Amino acid sequence: MTTEAEARPGRRLGSIIALACLMLVLVGIMVMIIWPRVVQTAVSPIGGPFTLTTQTGEKLSDADLQGKPFAIFFGFTRCPEVCPTTLWETTEALKSLGPDADKLRVLFVSVDPTRDTPEFMARYLQSFDKHITGLTGTEAEIADVGKEYRIYYEKVPTEDGDYTMNHTASIFLMDAQGQFAGTISYGEDMATRLQKLRRLIGTAT
Ligand code: NI
C-alpha cells in the first residue's frame, strides 16, 4: 500500500513534466507565429503598390510607373534643410542628365499631407526640376506607402507650439519593373549620384 508521503514526489514529478510539456507547446506556438514574420521582414522587398495624388490633383499609382525607372523620396515642403537640399541636388543631377532625364521619374512624397495639399506642393515644386512629381494623400495612404518603403517619419512639436517632421532622407531607386535597385544617401557626392542614376536608366558607360 502506498502512503501519502511516498506518492507526493511522484505526483510532483508528474506535474513538472506536464508543465514542461505545456511550456514547450507554448514556445512552439510562439515560434510558429513569430518566425514567419521575422522571415517576411527579412525578405520583403522595398517598395509596393500605392495610389497617391500629384501636385496637379491627378491620381498616380505604382502601375502607372511600370516601364520607366523612378527615384522616390519622402519629406515635406516646410522642411528647413534636408528636403530643399535633396530637391536642389536632384535638380542639378537631372540637369546633368540632359535629355536622358526623360527616361526617369522622380517622386517626392509628403509625410506631412495635412499641410502639403496638391496646390501647396505645386507652388513649392516650381523652384525645382519639372521631372519631379510631388505626391500627397491621406494620412493612411502616406502611412501605407511609408511602410512599404520602410521609411521613418515622425511629427515633432516645436517650442513655438508648431511642429516639424523628422524623416528618412534617402532616395530609393526603383527599376522599370518597380523593383528596388538601390539608394542615394543624403549628402552623397554628385559624381556617385549621377553614376547611380545613369545605371538606373541604363545609360551608364
Ligand atoms: Ni525633409
Image (spheres, grey):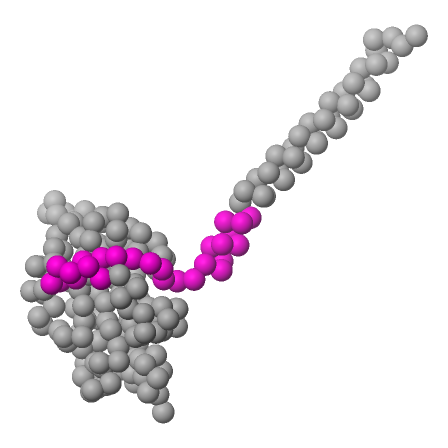
Residue at the extreme bottom of the image, as rendered: 205
Residue at 30% across, 64% down: 63
| Residue 142 position within the rendered picture, expressed as x and y whole percent measured from the top left | 25, 53
Closer-to-camera residue (32/23): 32
Task: Pick the quarter of the image with the N terminus.
Answer: top right
- Apparent side of residue 69 relative to residue 126 in the rendered image (left or right): right
State which quadrant residue 148 falls in: bottom left
| Residue 90 position within the rendered picture, expressed as x and y whole percent measured from the top left | 22, 76
Residue 46 falls inside the magenta stretch: yes
State which quadrant residue 124 falls in: bottom left
Residue 58 falls inside the magenta stretch: yes
Closer-to-camera residue (96/3): 96
- Where are the magenta residues, as a range? 35-60
Residue at 15% across, 60% down: 58
Residue at 80% across, 15% down: 8
Vertical side of 200 occupied by 76: above or below: above
- Apparent side of residue 67 relative to residue 99 in the rendered image (left or right): right
